Structures are given as structure tokens and as C-alpha cells.
Amino acid sequence: MNTLKVATFLLLAALLTACAGVRKNVSFAAESPEALLVFGTIAEEPTAYTVTFSTYDPPQQRLTSNSFRGQPFVEHRGVGVLYHALKVPPGTYVLKSVTRQVIPQKVICLSEGTFAFELKPGQVTYVGNLAFRSEQVARAGTEQAAAIAALKEYPNVSGELITAPLTEVTFPNGTDIFGAGEVCGGYYVKEQPRS
């Protein structure tokens, strides 16, 4: 039994170490068919937060991805400001939710008011900073100089950082895969009547 616990611990430690290293090992250049999403996170307390983005269809005003595909995410652990760089397929994205990693987990769903932005192939796009405080998320402005300085920690990233224009949007929630409960963005969204 102890051998199983030790093996599980070692496997989890290896996975967490691998995940921690991937973030700074992003390779990206202007020739990339993908886009690079850059943003900052600010936490005032030592709680971990998971930030989740989703692809979005502006004419339909709905998410076009779910947790199985098309939802890039990153964790913020610790207090202070961290900058993140995620390589993603080009397209229109929204900040979907922020999950406060406490027991029980608290998902802060942003369906009633978030922002959308366009990511283009080969472009390094900054969408600003997000501030977390307990169960609240707020946009915390843009600090392009700080984002550029933070990108220097990513030695394999090249390209000029641009700040994306943001558009205020909403999206409908749906049900879980079994239709039993409401989920932020949901897997199955009821069609909204068009006026």
C-alpha cells in the first residue's frame, strides 16, 4: 500500500514539475499558424485561481467550445502579478470563467458580462490584466511595458506585442452533459429566441 502511495506521489510531482516548465518553454514566431495570447493576473491572497478562455461566435453570441476542446486555461498560484503566454489556434475568444481553487471550488462564471477579442495567426496579443479578490474578478487595465518585460522570460517567443481591442459580450449558460444541471457556458445550450 505504501508503495502505491509513493508511486502516486512521484507521478503527481513529475506531472506538476512538467506543467510548471512548459509555460516558459513556449516557442512562437511571426510565421506561426497559431496565435499567442498574453495576459496578466493579479491576486491579493494566496489562493490558486484557474483562468479559462473559450472560443466565441460573435454573431450567435455563444461559446463554440467546451472543456473537452477549445478552452485554453492557466493557473495563477501565489500573491502578486504574474504574466502568462498561451499558444492557441487563431479566432475570437472570451474570458469564460475563473475558478477559485478552494474547497469547495467556486466557479466565477462570466456569462453575464465579459470581453471578447480576436487572436490572429503569428500575432502576440495582449488582452490586459485580471485582478482576483475572493470571489470577484475585475479587469485591471493594461500595462504593456510590464507585459513586454515579462515576455523576456520566454526565450523562444519573438514578435511585437500588440494590445487587443476588447468588446463587451455575454453568452448563455447551458446544461451539463447529462442535462441535469446548469454549467457555465454549458455543453448543451438551449436556442435563444431571436427578436
Image (spheres, rainbow, N blue to C red):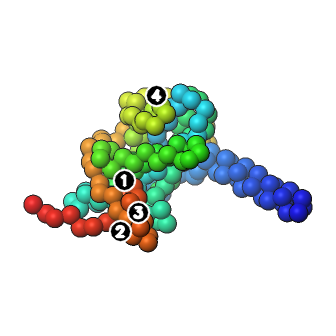
Tell me which amino acid carries mark 4: Ala
> Which residue matches tag 1?
93
Relative depth, front residue between 126 and 17 = 17
Relative depth, front residue between 73 and 143 = 73
Query: Quadrant where the C terminus lies?
Result: bottom left
Mark 3 or 1, closer to the camera: 3
For the residues marked 4 and 1, what is the alpha-carbon distance in whole angstroms?
Answer: 23 Å
Tell me which amino acid carries mark 1: Tyr
Mark 1 or 2, closer to the camera: 2
Query: Which residue is at 41% across, 59% downward?
Result: 183
Give the mark nearest the N terminus, 3 or 1. 1
For the residues marked 1 and 2, what is the alpha-carbon distance in whole angstroms?
Answer: 19 Å
Q: Is residue 19 left or right of residue 142?
A: right
Element at badge 3?
loop
Q: Residues within 10 Å of mark 2 (few under 14, many from 20)?
A: some
For the residues marked 3 and 2, what is the alpha-carbon distance in whole angstroms?
Answer: 11 Å
Decide: is 50 above or below 32. above
Tell me which amino acid carries mark 3: Gly
Q: Which mark is residue 188?
A: 2
Query: Quadrant where the N terminus lies?
Result: bottom right
Mark 2 or 4, closer to the camera: 2
Relative depth, front residue between 159 and 79 = 79
Query: Which residue is at 21% across, 60% downward?
Result: 59
For the residues marked 3 and 4, what is the alpha-carbon distance in whole angstroms?
Answer: 43 Å
Relative depth, front residue between 181 and 125 = 181
Q: Which mark is residue 145?
A: 4
Q: Is residue 189 left or right of residue 39?
A: left
Tell me which amino acid carries mark 2: Tyr
Q: Residues within 10 Å of mark 1 (few under 14, many from 20)?
A: many
